[in-house]
């Protein structure tokens, strides 16, 4: 059966790609779109390594069909930094060494940004709940949570 | 998997037509948080996927006034949570819907999918049963309505007939003094499947229960409406004797399985405990309304 043509927007840029009806958005990102920053962990929506936003809403790209991207705005980890300028969360994760092997990190960052957009002043519990859909096999959760809280404090200060 | 067809109809008639024409070879796609996992595991092998999210009725939240709402079957948990009016009228239904999976899953998962997946442990279903939600269904023979508790037939099975699609949930108007709540017991603190799920919906007048509905999940092949528990609460001031009678009714309704999350004895005991705790939250909310 012929491939399906999809027109969408990824990180602000209009893009087109071809896919099978059964391809996931994750397959399309890592395949035809060549955006391999989004990782595949479980492929069943449990681990959050493939987190993206669609029209600003957090989702697992493994639980979305690529054809569903038609006409929507996709944001991935590749769009998080502005050129050479890292997003404050990325900068803080480096400063505080809030990563170990790094496979979960893109998903954690996308999730954390989504959390801080909705709640710029989260409690530790809110951060832990907000990131509960992102599993870290290295179990480095404490540094991740502290880095998110620290970033939130700095972003609030910068916004004053 | 290469010969799958993807359809995204704009109208319900087109969707029903395609679904019926596929004669069992099609699956409905709302959030896909169950379907895509089943396809990956090889459990579901649809020839056609019918995405219903481009049908306006499927994704609409309609405020019908007086606390009554119609919710499209494909509305995601995240979208429902942002509706201030719904949050105020039905906090118990909302907390149940929002317990389905992570923030990522909430971006996609819908109450319609939760109902049609027909897990006995689906979190939104006991709360919808307690709310007295009525499900609108459309199929090749037209539209019909069913109380939500009549939809599940057993684990993974529903009473929908071939070609029928769940369109929306209608929640009734809220009299003064109404409150609902949902609690579940899980072995972890988050991101788990209910061992027992409990929805309670109360209407209080001067501290006396005028109306009550109790929905009980994860302790039988389907989510249950526990009418005996509601009868024990109605007319009472939620005193200890009434609560114990309602808890006993819940325990009596249980026909649970033994599994790694909980034994039969544990699930039965917890059902009674959760009735009391959930009723207390519903009563507190009713007092504020």
Image (cartoon, rainbow, N blue to C red):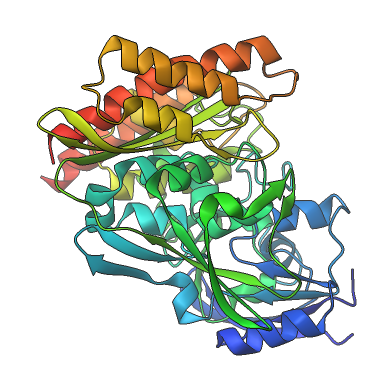
Displayed quadrant of residue A103 = top right
Image coordinates of residue B278 in percent, x first then y, are: 36, 26
- Between residues B275 and B89, which one lies in front from this camera angle? B275
Q: Is residue B35 visible?
A: yes
Query: B150 and B167: which one is in front?
Result: B150
Q: Is residue A65 left or right of residue B103?
A: right
Q: Residue at x 55, y 41 (%)?
A: B101
Is A84 or B217 nearer to us in this picture?
Answer: B217
Q: Is residue B118 left or right of residue B275?
A: right
Instruction: Identify the residue shown where x is 67% and y is 73%.
Output: B164
Residue A94 appears in view = no
Q: Which quadrant is home to the C terminus of chain B? A: top left
Please give the name of the residue rendered at 30% of the width and 43% of the height, measured from the top-left corner.
Answer: B91
Q: Is A26 situated above or below B205?
A: below
Up-down relation of residue B279 to residue B112 (above or below): above
Residue B209 position in % (x across, y down): 23, 32
The quarter of the picture where residue B163 lies is bottom right
Give residue B277's position: percent from left, percent from top.
36, 19
- Judging depth in this view, the residue of A96 and A41 nearest the camera is A41
Instruction: Give the tally of numbered discs.
Output: 0
Q: Is residue A40 above or below residue B271?
A: below
**Image location (x, y in percent) of residue B24:** 84, 72
């Amino acid at each position: 059966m012929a491939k399906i043509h999809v027109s969408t927007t990824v990180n602000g840029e209009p893009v087109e790609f071809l896919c099978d009806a059964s391809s996931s958005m994750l397959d399309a990102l890592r395949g035809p779109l060549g955006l391999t920053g989004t990782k595949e962990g479980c492929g069943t929506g449990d681990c959050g390594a493939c987190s993206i936003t669609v029209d600003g809403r957090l989702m697992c790209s493994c639980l979305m069909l690529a054809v569903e991207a038609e006409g929507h705005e996709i944001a991935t980890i590749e769009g998080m930094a502005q050129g050479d300028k890292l997003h404050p969360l990325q900068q803080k994760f480096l400063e505080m060494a809030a990563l170990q092997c790094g496979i979960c990190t893109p998903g954690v960052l996308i999730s954390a940004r989504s959390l801080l957009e909705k709640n710029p002043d989260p409690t530790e519990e809110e951060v832990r709940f907000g990131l509960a859909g992102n599993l870290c096999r290295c179990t480095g959760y404490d540094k991740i949570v502290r880095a998110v809280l620290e970033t939130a404090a700095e972003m609030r200060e910068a916004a004053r | 998997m290469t010969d799958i067809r993807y359809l995204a109809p704009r109208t319900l008639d087109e969707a029903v037509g395609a679904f019926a024409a596929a004669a069992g070879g099609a699956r409905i796609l709302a959030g896909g948080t169950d379907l895509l996992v089943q396809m990956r595991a090889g459990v579901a092998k649809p020839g056609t996927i019918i995405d219903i999210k481009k049908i306006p009725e499927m994704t609409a939240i309609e405020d019908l006034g007086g606390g009554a709402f119609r919710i499209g079957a494909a509305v995601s948990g995240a979208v429902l949570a942002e509706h201030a009016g719904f949050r105020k009228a039905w906090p118990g239904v909302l907390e149940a819907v929002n317990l389905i999976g992570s923030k990522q899953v909430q971006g996609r998962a819908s109450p319609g999918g939760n109902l049609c997946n027909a897990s006995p442990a689906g979190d939104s279903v006991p709360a919808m049963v307690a709310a007295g939600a009525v499900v609108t269904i459309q199929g090749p023979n037209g539209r019909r309505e069913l109380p939500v508790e009549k939809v599940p037939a057993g684990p993974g099975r529903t009473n929908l007939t071939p070609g029928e699609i769940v369109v929306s949930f209608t929640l009734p108007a809220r009299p003064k003094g109404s409150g609902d709540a949902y609690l579940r017991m899980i072995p972890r603190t988050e991101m788990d499947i209910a061992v027992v799920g409990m929805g309670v919906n109360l209407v209080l007048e001067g501290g006396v229960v005028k109306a009550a509905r109790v929905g009980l999940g994860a302790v039988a092949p389907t989510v249950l409406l526990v009418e005996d528990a509601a009868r024990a609460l109605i007319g009472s001031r939620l005193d200890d004797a009434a609560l114990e009678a309602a808890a006993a009714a819940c325990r009596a309704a249980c026909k649970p399985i033994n599994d790694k999350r909980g034994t039969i004895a544990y699930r039965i005991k917890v059902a009674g405990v959760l009735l009391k705790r959930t009723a207390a939250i519903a009563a507190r909310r009713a007092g504020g309304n």
